[in-house]
Structure formats: C-alpha cells, structure tokens
Amino acid sequence: MTARLGVVGAGSAAAAATYALGTARPDTETTVFEKSRGVCGRAAARRRDGIVYEYGANYLMDADDRVRTLVTDELSDGLVEVDGPIWTFDADGNVSESPNGEGHRWTYEDGITRLAKHLFGRAGVEVHRETRITDVHCAEGWHLVDSDGGEHGPFDALLLTPPAPQTADLLRNTGNAAADRLGNAAGTVRYQTIWTAVLGYDFTVDAPYYGLRSSDPDGDIGWIGREERKPGHVPDGKSVLVVQASPDWSTARYDAPPAQNVAALARRTAKILGDPRLAAPDWSDHQGWKYALPTASIADAGPGPHVLRDAAQSDLYITGDWVAGEARLHAAVRNGLETGEAIARSLASSSPHGK
C-alpha cells in the first residue's frame, strides 16, 4: 500500500525533506499545505518592474558539504554567486573592511525561492497554497483541518515545518500524548524579531562591498545588503538596499506605522553609507518577521531530544532551522534532508501510528 505523508508548511526545510523522501521512497504520496501564496518560507523574494529582491534570508552560505554538492550539481539551474565581500560598521557608522570567511554565497537569478521550487519539482510534489492548517489530531492516522473547515487525511506520517510557536499551537490536544509533549517543548523555543525595509533607487550606489554587518549589539540596524550585487536581480543604473533592523529595534517598532519605520531606517542607512541621497528612496517595501531567528534549538528545551524521539515513534516529525539549532538557510536545508530520510526509514519499516 502507498504510504501517505502530510506536510504543513512549504519552506526550504520542508522542500528538502520531500526531496529526500522522494529520492528514497518515490512511491510515497506526499501532500504539502502552505498558508501563503509562495514557497521557501523566510527565504523569500519579490519582484518589481524587472527587479528581484530578497527580503528574508539574504543568500545560501557555502557552509555544508552536502548542501553545497546538492545545490551546485542537481539544483544549479539559475544558480548565481553573490558578488562582493561583507564588511562591518560600528556604533558610529564607521565602515571597516573585514576578512571574508564565509566562502561562496549563492542565490538564483529569479530569487532564492527557486531553491524550494527546484526541490519540490524534483520530488514531484504539489503544494496546496493558501491553505492554512489550524488543527492536528491523531485517530487511526494523522488528520488535518484547515481554516475553511476542510479535512485532510488520514496520513501515515506527518511533518510540521512552521516556526516553533506556530507548531506548538498546532500540537495541542491532538489525541496523541507524544505529539502534545512535542508541542509543549516547541512552545519554549524563543525567537528574535526582525523588521526589514527594502529601499529602491534610480541611481547606482558606489561601494566595494556586497553587504554590511553591524558590530554594535545595541545598534538599530543589523544588516545592509545590496541586491545589485546579485546577478540578474537589479538592472544597470539602479540600486536596491535590503536593510534589516536589529532585534531590539524590530521588537520595539514592530507595530509602528511602516512608513515611519522605513523613513527612520533610510535616514540611518544614508548616514552609514555616507550618501544623503539614500534618505529618500524612489520606492520602498517592507516586511516584519515576528519569528525570524530562533535563539536555540528544540533539543535545548529540557526534554527536547526525548520528545523528538517519542514523536517519531508516532510518525510525527518536525524540521526547520529551530530544529537544526542554527538560524541559517543551509542548516534548515540540511535538517530537512535528514528528516526526510528518517521518515523514509520509518515508512519502510511500516511502524504503526498513534503509539
């Protein structure tokens, strides 16, 4: 009998898990439910008048051998390398050249979301977009309920990939004790909030670096990235800056009027880069990420390792950067690959659910 897997969320870890599962067990019937219209989660891209800009994860680091091999070999269609080093700036806005210790940095010509599209495509998985799952319960298999009251399942195994607080909300009173314990553990994982401004200009910013990272833990800006240093993203003669506020600033100003936040970050950016023109962008965009950066993994949450093991024995799995314990895109992808392989082994052994 064909095994059925239900997946909640279509981020990079989910995509990697379906790819690994599809490679190991191509006969598995996998169904993915995503609340938004896009895929790849916080590795997100938007398009505007021929411009592509990434307002969440800035790039994929060359920091994992397995992910590097996968991306540069099987997923290389449209892959481009970010051009330029990353320097730093201090509390006074002084910019300093820094050693480049991250190796290659990759994205795709049409945006970082191509990573998940490649992975889902190779897995042959259809993503049901704009389908928000609001309830999970276990009774002779795993069942899901969406926000419109639609029911999905039963599934032989279930993979949850939203941020920890949202996963915790789903795993309450599921009818499965191991799942409820996993939800309680997920609820203890904490996140840093990031508010991002995207600043577009009809002129070229002249600078030798791709990005600037703050060395001031108390500053208002943590990162400034130049999208024009990503091949295919920004037409000649234009510039796009992705400005990510610090966690403290982002938390304090998260619900402030977006126009005020954008203006404040643009003024500060102009001072750091030493160009008064940057205080008045020709266009702007913004995004608040309430659950942007996990500060620890679920394995650090007291009984974390035990609840992960017990949930897996009930054919319930989780994946993401908060499971990997590193708020990096490559870590989420690697964790997804490993989780997909674990699901494949479980389905191959035909372990019963609901233990």
Image: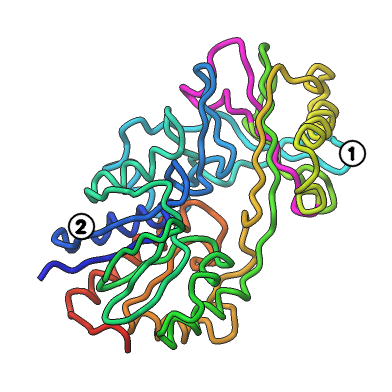
Mark 2 or mark 1, earlier in chain: 2
- Residue 163 is situated, as x and y percent measured from the top left of the image, at 54, 61
Residue 244 is covered by the magenta coloring: yes
Q: Which residue is mark 1?
A: 92
In the rendered image of this protein, does residue 61 appear above or below residue 260? below
* Local secondary structure at mark 2: helix
Q: Which residue is mark 2?
A: 23
Task: Examine the rendering and report whether any part of residue 151 can be seen.
Answer: yes
Q: 272 above or below 304? A: above
Are there few (<14), some (14-19), or many (20+) residues within 10 Å of tag 2? some
Q: Quadrant of residue 38?
A: top left
Which amino acid type corresponds to the residue marked 2 in the rendered image?
Thr
Left or right: 138, with 322 as reference point:
left
Q: Considering the image in quadrants, where does the N terminus appear?
A: bottom left
- Distance between mark 2 and mark 1 Cα atoms: 51 Å
Q: Are the residues flagged by discs 2 and 1 in contact, CB closer than 8 Å?
A: no
Q: Residue at x 44, y 46 (%)?
A: 40
Q: Please tell me whether mark 1 sits on a helix, a strand or a loop.
A: loop
Question: Residue 64 in magenta?
Answer: no
Number of residues whose C-alpha sits closer than 10 Å to that of mark 1, classed few (under 14), some (14–19) or many (20 or more)? few
From this viewpoint, which residue is outermost toward the left? 1
Q: Tell me if residue 108 comes above or below residue 16 in the rendering.
A: above
Which residue appears at 61% of the width and 10% of the height?
237
Q: Which residues are magenta?
A: 226-248
Image quadrant for the C terminus? Answer: bottom left
Whole-percent x, y for residue 316 in the image: 36, 75
Under mark 1, the amino acid is Asp
Q: Position of residue 71 (x, y in %)?
A: 35, 44
* Residue at point 69%, 58% (across, down): 192
Front in this rendered view, residue 22 or 131? 131
